[in-house]
Amino acid sequence: MTAIIFLAPDGTRYEIDAPDGSSVMQAAIRNDVPGIDADCGGACACATCHVYVDEAQIGQLAPMEAMEEDMLDFALDVRANSRLSCQIRVRPELRGLTLTVPPRQA
């Protein structure tokens, strides 16, 4: 298990112990993090699990693949640190990863 931190749009902090190998999106859904809709169930087909990765931690993530980059075109208020949480795999090295949920999803 790896601790992942979500900051909800209202400022509430959710620290979740996520199973290694699962997606960050799955951990958010299982723990009722508000704002992570995940309409496609994690198939990288909707952009409703969009998050902002703490800028100091973005380099810890695997590079974004083309499909994720294409889906982010459908997200609202995309930034340089935007990622789809369904594409981030939990691993011990990500302990303390902090993700901010945007105020609105696509």
Image (cartoon, grey):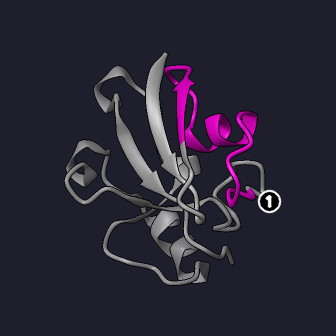
Q: Residue at x 50, y 63 (%)?
A: 68
Query: Residue 69 lies in what quarter of the image?
Result: bottom left
Please provide the residue range marked out in magenta: 14-37
Q: On the picture, is 24 further left or further right than 46?
A: left
Position in image of residue 62 (x %, y %): 32, 45
Q: On the picture, is 91 further left or further right than 26?
A: left
Would you call the spot at circle 1 few (<14 residues within 10 Å), some (14-19), or many (20 or more)?
few
Position in image of residue 1 (x %, y %): 49, 15
Q: How many marks?
A: 1
When the figure is inspected, residue 64 is found, relative to residue 106, above or below; the finding is above
The answer to if 23 sits in the magenta stretch is: yes
- Image quadrant holding the C terminus, namely bottom right
The answer to if 74 sits in the magenta stretch is: no
When the figure is inspected, residue 24 is found, relative to residue 2, above or below; the finding is below
**In the depicted view, which residue is nearer to us: 59 or 33?**
33
Q: Residue at x 31, y 56 (%)?
A: 54
Q: What is the secondary structure assignment of the residue under circle 1? A: loop
Name the residue tied to disc 1: 39
The furthest residue to the top: 1
Q: Residue at x 55, y 25 (%)?
A: 18
Position in image of residue 14 (x %, y %): 56, 40
**In the depicted view, which residue is nearer to us: 47 or 68?**
47
Amino acid at dot 1: Asp
When the figure is inspected, residue 53 is found, relative to residue 106, above or below; the finding is above
Position in image of residue 5 (x %, y %): 46, 40
Q: Residue at x 34, y 34 (%)?
A: 96
